[in-house]
Structure formats: C-alpha cells, structure tokens
Amino acid sequence: MSETDNGADPRTARPSRRPRSIPPTRRHVLAAGAGAGAAALLGGVGAATEAQAAPPPRSPAPAAAPDLAPYAAYWFPDSLPKGVPGPGITWRSLRQWTPESDPDLPYNTATVPLAPRFTPVPPNAGARAGQARISSLVSFGPTARNPSQGSATADHYALTHWAYLDELVFWGGSSGEGIVLAPNAPVVDAAHRHGVPVLGNVFLPPVVYGGDLQWTRDLVQQDSQGRFPIAEKLVLVARTHGFDGWFVNAETDGGDSALAARMRAFLRALRAAGAPYGLRITWYDAMNSTGRVGWQGALNALNQEFFEDRAGRVADTVFVDFRWTPQTLAASGALADRLGRSRHELWAALDVGSDGWNSGVRWDAVIPRERAHVVSFGFYRPEWTRNHLTDRSPGAFHRADDRFWTGESLDPAHPAPEDTWRAPATAVADRSTVTALPFACAFNTGHGERWYEDGKVTCDTPWNHLGLQDRLPGRRWAVETTGARPSVTLDFARAWRGGSSLLVSGSLTAPAVVGLHCTRLPLTASAVLELVHATESGAVTVEVGVATREPAAPGEPLPYTWLKAPAQGSAAGSWRTSRVALATLGGRTAYGIAVRITARGSGAVSWRLGALSVRGDSARRRPAAPGALTVDASAQQNGTAAVRLSWRRAAGPVRHHELYRLLPDGSRRFLGGTCGTALYLPAVTRAGQEPAARFEVRAVDELYAASDPAATTLPWT
C-alpha cells in the first residue's frame, strides 16, 4: 500500500472497478522532489551547488559545499539493505539511533501541543456526531530528502480541512530508502493546532516491492531480558519528535504463527511503553495470526488478535484493507461490538489517490444515510486534489480541496443533491479547537506566492510551511442569504498577514452571512473583537455576528447577535480595522463568529477579510524576546551561504518564531518562520560588499504581536 519501485499495487485492483493507473515509482518521486528538498523555507533559490572543476589539469576540483539541509527522518529497524543507497538517500538503523547523535533533530521537533477540541451542532442534518470518523494516509513528499521545514514553492499539499479528521498518517517508505518514517514538524504542528493526532509510519513492504522478512524480525526482536528494543526506540522517536504514535503495516509475507505471536507481543510492548505519553497505534489489515500476509478486508477471526485479544486492547484502530465488501464491513462492526470495542475504531480503506471524487465508493456500506454508520473510513492519498491538477497554483488547489471535503455546493450548511461523491462534510460532524482567549486568524493556509505583514510584502518569493498555518474555519463555506450566493474563497492575490486572505465576491442581491469559526470562547466585559478588512470594489456595510448559544438541532443556523463594525480608514481598497467591544456579551460564551455583508448599491462586490481576533482586554502585551541567536553551521560558496541557526525559546506563550535579514539599506526581509527554535536557510546571498549578513529572530504570540529581536551575524569570507 505504498509507492514502490515496482509499479501499481495489485492488492487495490478489484473486479468491480476499472484498472488503476500506475502510480509514479518512488524513484521518480525522489527525482522530482530533490530540487524542492534542496530549497527549504522562504527566500531561497536552492541549496549550495557543487563547484565546477578548476581549468588547470593539475589543480584539484574545489570540494562541494556540504549539504546542511535537514530532512524528515527515516530508518530501517536494524539491519540495512545490501549494496549501496541511491543518490540523496542515507540508510540508518533505528536501533542505533539516539537523539543526541541526530544533528537534524532540532529541525524535526514539533512543539505545538495537541489541542483539545469539541464537536459543535452540525451545520446539516446528515452530518453525525459520535459515529463515523476519518483517518487519512497522506504522502507529503518523498521518503528521502523530504525537507524538514517547508520549501521555496507554493506548490504543496497544504491540508486545511482538519475539522473532519480523527488522525493523520504520515505515509511513505520504500525498501530502497527506509521503512520507518517520522513526520516532519510542520505537518505535526499544523495538525496539533487543529486537534488532530499524527502517526509515523512503519512499512514492512511486500516481497515483490523489495521487502525482506529480516526487517520484520528486526522490528520484533527481543533482548536477553525479553524486552523489545525497537518498540522502545519508536516511543523515543515519537516523544522527541513530538508526534502521537505509529501506523504499523506488516506486509512482508513468509512468516509463521510464531512470528505473528511476537508481532502481537511487540504491539503490546509498544502500547505499554507509549501509554504514559498518550501514544496510539493503528494496525493495517495485512499480516494475520498465521504469520502470513492475507488481506482480509475485514476484522475477523484471523486478524482480531492484533486489535483485541484475551488480555485486552492491542491496537487503538485497524485500517481495513481495500477488498472489503458491504457484508464484511457489517460483520466487522458486529465483531467489534462483541469484543466490547467501538465499531468506529475500524477504518474502511477508500482509495482516492487515482480518481479523487470520481472514485467508485460503495458509500452505503460505510456511512448509510438512513441508518447508523457501519464503521469509520480512511482515505488513501487524498492529496490527489493537488496532484491531478494542471494548474497547481494555491488558489486552484484549495478550490479542488474544498470540493473534495465539502462537496459540489462548496457549502456544508447546504449540501449538494446526492451524487456519486459523498463528501465528508455531508456525513461527518466537524470539530474545532477555538476554546480560549486570545484567539486570532489571518486566514493563512501555510503556503503562498508571497509573505505579507500588515498588508505589505516582506518576501516576494513562493513558500510553504504548514507550521505557520492558522486555525482556519472548519466549515467552508457556510453562507446564509435570501439572494444570490456570493463566491467565498481563500485567495492568494493579497493578504494582511501570511500568504492568503478570505475573499467574498459577487452580486449581493441580499445580505450574506458568512460563517467563520465555531467557538467556545468565554467572553468578559472587556472582550474586544477586531476585523482587518478591505473593500476592493462596490460599497458594503459590514457587521459582526456572535452566537451566544448553539442551534437547537443539526442543520439550523446559529442565532447570531449582530454588532456594527465601524471601519477606521477610508481609502478605497485599503485595509481597514474594525474594533467591536463585546461588553454587552460579557459573562457569556461565544459559540460562533460570522460576518454579514450588505451591498450599498447594485454592482458587484469584492470584499476581503485579512484577519480576525478576539481578546480579553484592550491591552496588547508583546511577548518576551528569544535569546542567543546563533549560527550553528554554514557553507559559503560564490557569495551565497547555506546557514543553520538556532536560538533559545522565549519565556511565556509563543505561537511561532520569525527570522529576518537586515539589509544594508535598512530594510528587513522575511526569511522564514518555525514553531521550533532552529531554522535552516538554503541560500543567503551577499548584498553588495556587506561584511556580514545580519539576522534577527522574533517570538510571535497568538495575536501576532512580535517581541524584541535577538540578533547575530554571519561574516562573509
């Protein structure tokens, strides 16, 4: 169930479906991703390149600049393949790994804690709370040379529909690179901000794809005291990297019942070691109790012991193979019930990697409309929403992604009439993490064509870094109007902060209510709500809605209290700030936030929302400054430097850190950001004859207030 070196995976070919197209091989993905992997973060033009040989025949060629770029971590359990690794690939033994010996660990460490979340009353009657949930297996990049901290392109799978996910699996691995993958920090930080756990991947590949049963034996090996050293290492990796557990996929055939018993004991050891840290395990339906690989497409007597045995829970969830039928799913749910487990801890695999919303899914076998959901479901490769596009600009990607998750109506409150694609928003209740003040959102998706601060461009190169993503509205986009529905999109042509903003456009023949965040915000008498917005065409009146109770039933609109949003500033198209005191709502809870836009005139309207914030009082306190900004390593060549920097985290709450270059003319250029305390810059170019490059790092809080800087320099040689 992975991209491999040998073409299409035969297990997903089913007689009822047309043949799958052959996916790109892992070698092809590696080659395609090498350029992006070399240029991490913003403002870079690539990693330092190998120098050309000097013309005189007796002079040795200058040494290539060392590759300082950090990459997402991957290993083999213990023994390594025979031969030598391919270009750009490093073979590592997990058993030999230690945090202290890993120079890339500071760049791969996620720091955002897993946020608690709640389930609001669903926006449509078909979306159900407490029933089916969704797992998603996503390949964000190649196994080898997958940048630790984003890259210098906006062409990236910037997942934003976290509200419907229950877990994310960082998918990948191959026999030629590595088969144990730790997710990179930006993915984990973005997921945690939205309350979604992230699992690393243990992929023991089929023999036809280069799998070696020795790697399975390495995984479940025991020491002289009966302990499982690789289980302990997997827990250590998850703890030090900051993610939430492991997806275990044992697909190498040739074992026996004794090996299966050791695998089950290994899973128990992994569970016991991870339990104090809240780690979770998802088991893939492949190896069964005989030790052989036989994909059941069900939870049944052959594989139930990897889910629940006589001693109790073994795995938290099971990813049921693609060959399920309506009958096997019904039987699986019934077996989970008899075991005393939730049937919604079973993920029915849905392959959307080839056809996306055109995939032929037997929905009634999983999430029937007229009766209780049978089991949960798992998407395999939903990044199809990006990969299938010819135009892979950020705007085009988000339009496709919204359709995948929300449906053709692009409105979860008003689902499209039933068709062959049953979008998650039509069946699964959304969730939110907006529960405390202060709260802010600049509608930043974690990638863009430029970087903006206070409406001005401070970096004019494309970028991606999911760790900088905001907590975005989960319901995109719930609109109420008696007139023509306007277009509501995340737009990248202009932003207040980050790379994107919310754009509402069209002929508003009646007031339009655009739902934003579902919340549980405790309001005080001093609470203030602030909007930063711009009217680019037409004339509008803007009001802010705050709901102080939930709807009585699914599908009913939130009952908003409407407050006028007077704007400061008057120039057409300029950013304006509207500050609304919430004193009349003090002591109550805000259950939702919306805006209502009314056209003043008959022409088309284009209105942009750049930022939304709610805070407990009018005072804005800057965060404390980070300390000890240090150049840890650098490689200079022809006036360009690759640089590793680190600093000491500031005291108090910090959302993320931002790094800037101070240029000789006195201007500042945004270089990148991270939630951690280390950043890699692939290509810092000397400005004129400056003696040294000057850097500053600032801590940024939840309201985007920046601290005083910590500074350092890199002398040019």
Image: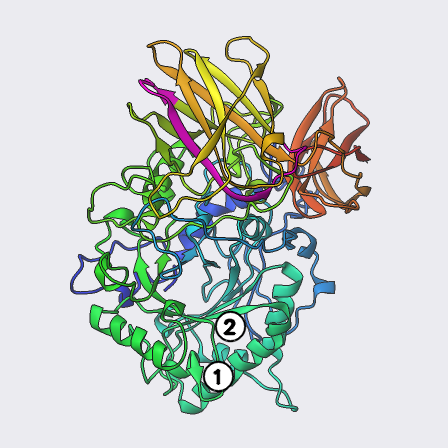
Q: Is residue 638 left or right of residue 318?
A: right
**Which segment did they paint magenta?**
505-528
Residue density around tag 2, few if under 14, some if 14–19, many if 20 or more, within 10 Å? few
Residue pictured at 41% horizontal, 57% vertical: 136
Where residue 701 sits, quadrant-wise, is top right
Q: Is residue 359 above or below residue 660?
A: below
Q: Is residue 486 above or below residue 213?
A: above
Position of the C terminus, as image quadrant, is top right
Residue pictured at 20% horizontal, 65% vertical: 14
Q: Is residue 502 left or right of residue 271?
A: left
Residue placed under numbered mark 2 in the picture: 82
Q: Is residue 512 above or below residue 380?
A: above
Residue placed under numbered mark 1 in the picture: 312
Query: Where residue 10 sits in the image (x, y, percent)?
Result: 27, 66
Position of the N terminus, as image quadrant, is bottom left
Q: Is residue 527 magenta?
A: yes
Element type at mark 2: loop
